């Protein structure tokens, strides 16, 4: 079982991506778009956790899930309000450009949550890993946000909650599944790994597709365009007289 960590700490992978995150968050328009997307993810996650509170038969988990859902709804509101405040002071462009969404899931990973049909232990294992991922990522976001103290303060505040979520889910997993909690964590880990692979593969496929289409446009199409232009130059302009022999038959067009 993973050791409960009282304080958040970014994983090596997230730390490695710090320069990318710094660049992405440096642009106000990208920041607005990401905050809005985070707001959606947090709100959707809160809705799913609310559903988890409905379906669990464990009274303690129901209470914890309800508190958790309220936290996630509040995070959604915080992100949305901050995005709105940024929009007021910054003109919006139609295309915010690269945002690296395929590089990391929408901050939280709660967007992959499926509540119905999951046992309490599966749900807790999934939630623990999602919250841990969120705490790691939000640590990096907070650290790269020196240029925007209000947004940084929001990440700081949310990070506190995500760390609590990360810890309570692990504690509860050990309570409801004292013997097989490691197995549930590994299963949830493999499932997240597979979804991460799919997300990265989709992103890479998009980049490769764009590159191939660009190469086709500049390398393969020009010879065809040149041939078409040459053929057009050889065509006679205007009406063309057709020889009587070729137009005798009424069964065909030419
Ligand atoms: Fe959250
Ligand atoms: Fe959370």
Image: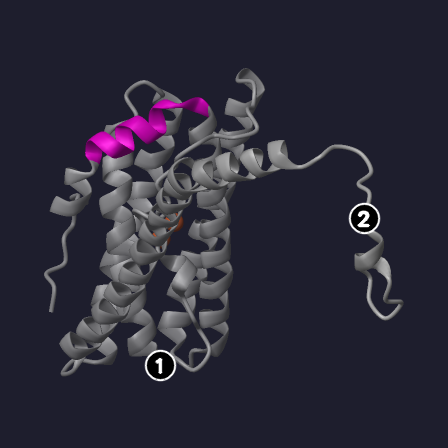
Q: Residue at x 14, y 75 (%)?
A: 182
Q: Residue furthest right?
A: 250
The residue drawn where x is 43% and y is 82% is 117
Q: How many marks?
A: 2
Asked if the residue at label 1 sits under 8 Å from ligand 2, the reply is no
75 shown above or below 112: above
Residue located 44% across and 73% down the image: 115
Could you say which quadrant of the image residue 210 lies in? top left
Task: Report the front residue among 198 and 186.
Answer: 198
Q: Quadrant of the N terminus?
A: bottom left
- Is any atom of residue 130 visible in this view? yes
Q: Nearer the viewer, residue 170 or 19?
A: 19
The answer to whether residue 248 is above or below residue 235 is: below
Label 1: few (<14), some (14–19) or many (≥20) C-alpha neighbours in 10 Å:
few
Magenta region: 18-28
Mark 2 element type: loop
Residue at which label 2 appears: 242
Residue underneath mark 1: 119
Instruction: Please indicate, yes or no, whether residue 106 appears anywhere in the rendered image.
Output: no
Decide which of 97, 186 is in the foreground and name it: 97
x and y percentages locating residue 140 in the rendered image: 23, 36
Relative side of 44 to 193, left or right: right
Name, please, the residue furthest toward the front.
245
Residue 23 part of the magenta-drawn span: yes
CB atoms of marks 2 and 1 within 8 Å: no
Quick one: SS at disc 1? loop
Q: Nearer the viewer, mark 2 or mark 1?
A: 2
Name the spot of residue 133 as percent of width and height, x first: 25, 52
Of 177 and 59, the residue lying toward us: 177
Task: Provide residue 24's location: percent of width, then percent of height.
Answer: 34, 30
Residue 204 pos. (x, y %)? 31, 51
Q: Earlier in the sequence, mark 2 or mark 1?
A: 1
């Amino acid at each position: 079982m993973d050791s409960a960590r009282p304080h958040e700490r970014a994983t090596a992978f997230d730390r490695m991506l710090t320069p990318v995150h710094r660049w992405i968050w440096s642009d106000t328009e990208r920041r607005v778009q990401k905050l809005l997307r985070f707001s959606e993810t947090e709100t959707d996650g809160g809705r799913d956790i609310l559903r988890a509170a409905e379906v669990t038969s464990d009274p303690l988990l129901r209470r914890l899930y309800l508190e958790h859902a309220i936290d996630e709804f509040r995070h959604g509101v915080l992100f949305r309000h901050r995005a709105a405040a940024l929009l007021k002071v910054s003109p919006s462009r139609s295309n915010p450009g690269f945002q690296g969404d395929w590089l990391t899931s929408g901050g939280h990973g709660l967007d992959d949550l499926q509540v119905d049909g999951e046992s309490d232990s599966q749900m807790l294992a999934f939630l623990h890993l999602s919250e841990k991922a969120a705490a790691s990522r939000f640590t990096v976001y907070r650290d790269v946000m020196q240029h925007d103290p209000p947004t940084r303060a929001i990440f700081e505040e949310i990070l506190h909650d995500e760390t609590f979520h990360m810890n309570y889910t692990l504690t509860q997993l050990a309570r409801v599944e004292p013997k097989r909690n490691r197995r549930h964590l590994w299963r949830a880990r493999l499932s997240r790994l597979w979804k991460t692979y799919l997300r990265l593969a989709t992103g890479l496929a998009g980049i490769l597709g764009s590159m191939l289409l660009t190469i086709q446009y500049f390398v393969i199409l020009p010879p065809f365009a040149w041939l078409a232009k040459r053929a057009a130059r050889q065509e006679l302009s205007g009406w063309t007289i057709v020889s009587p022999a070729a137009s005798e038959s009424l069964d065909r067009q030419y």
